[in-house]
């Protein structure tokens, strides 16, 4: 089974690319959706989050704005939150991959926004990076409710620059030319990746542990 990472900076069109891949019949694991499920009422992440950040869970519901205010610009607080959420997300990801392997799926995609930031490229057989011109990225992001120039700048500081992601990509998927060219590039990339042999599954616990340690050291 070939495991492919899908990533890209904020506003680059990753969600659109993931939707297109699903329409092509490719199973896609959505890391952001997994985080939302874990933080939803009754989610496994809520109790430890409330313990680490008292007051952000009210009547069983996470106040995302309150939590965001606690961790925004605070590296120590962000690391505490990541230490809670990341292992739970990784557990769900392994379950997704196991089910896909049992079904005999030839290729699966892991939709992970911070793939390179967490050195996740070590755990996949190839990486698709969605990319668009910087001016278009800014237009897309600034149109989002509640977004400010300061908030965007803070998000970009936490992300590996687009130029670096493009260099590290197995395939760069352009998303600034319209939907049809994006879909065509994705279909071509899938055909190319299906020709190779997967090496990331079954997982190697020693490699994964070492990669996680390196990623934590990088964020300090």
Image (cartoon, rainbow, N blue to C red):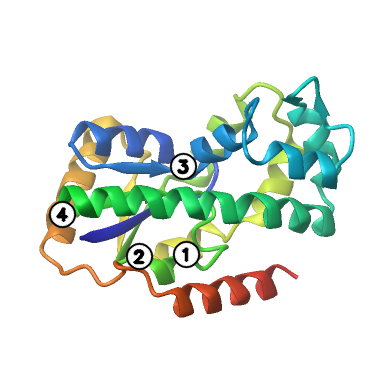
Disc 2/disc 1 C-alpha distance (Å): 7 Å
For residue 12, which numbered disc appears in the image? 3
Query: Residue sitting at 26 percent across and 39 percent down?
Result: 21
Asked which secondary structure carries label 2, the reply is loop
Disc 3/disc 4 C-alpha distance (Å): 27 Å
Disc 4/disc 2 C-alpha distance (Å): 14 Å
Which quadrant holds the C terminus?
Answer: bottom right
Q: Do the residues labelled 2 and 1 touch (CB within 8 Å)?
A: yes
Tell me the residue that label 4 is attached to.
106
Asked which secondary structure carries label 4, the reply is loop
Q: How crowded is mark 4: few (under 14 residues within 10 Å), some or many (20 or more)?
A: some
Does the image show residue 15?
Answer: yes
For residue 120, which numbered disc appears in the image? 1
Image location of residue 109, percent across then percent down: 31, 50
Disc 1/disc 4 C-alpha distance (Å): 20 Å
For residue 75, which numbered disc appears in the image? none
Disc number lying in front (3 or 1): 1
Query: Residue sitting at 78 percent across and 29 percent down?
Result: 65
Disc number lying in front (1 or 4): 4
**In the shown orientation, is residue 8 left or right of residue 159?**
left
Q: Are marks 3 and 4 in contact (CB under 8 Å)?
A: no
Asked which secondary structure carries label 3, the reply is loop
Tell me the residue that label 2 is attached to.
124
């Amino acid at each position: 089974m070939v495991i492919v990472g899908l990533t890209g900076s904020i506003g680059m069109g990753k969600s659109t690319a993931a939707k297109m891949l699903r329409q092509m019949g490719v199973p896609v694991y959505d890391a952001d959706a997994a985080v939302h499920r874990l933080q939803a009422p009754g989610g496994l992440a809520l109790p430890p989050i409330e313990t680490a950040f008292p007051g952000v869970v009210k009547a069983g519901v996470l106040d995302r704005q309150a939590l965001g205010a606690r961790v925004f610009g605070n590296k120590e607080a962000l690391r505490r939150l990541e230490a809670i959420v990341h292992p739970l997300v990784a557990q769900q990801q392994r379950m997704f991959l196991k089910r896909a392997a049992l079904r005999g799926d030839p290729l699966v995609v892991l939709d992970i926004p911070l793939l390179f930031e967490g050195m996740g490229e070590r755990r996949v057989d190839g990486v698709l990076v969605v990319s668009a011109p910087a001016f278009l990225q800014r237009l897309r992001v600034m149109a989002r409710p509640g977004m400010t120039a300061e908030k965007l700048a803070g998000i970009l500081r936490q992300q590996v620059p687009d130029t670096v992601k493009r260099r590290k990509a197995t395939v760069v998927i352009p998303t600034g030319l319209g939907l049809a060219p994006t879909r065509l590039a994705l279909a071509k990339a899938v055909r190319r990746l299906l020709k190779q042999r997967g090496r990331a599954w079954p997982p190697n616990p020693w490699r994964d542990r070492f990669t996680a340690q390196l990623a934590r050291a990088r964020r300090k």
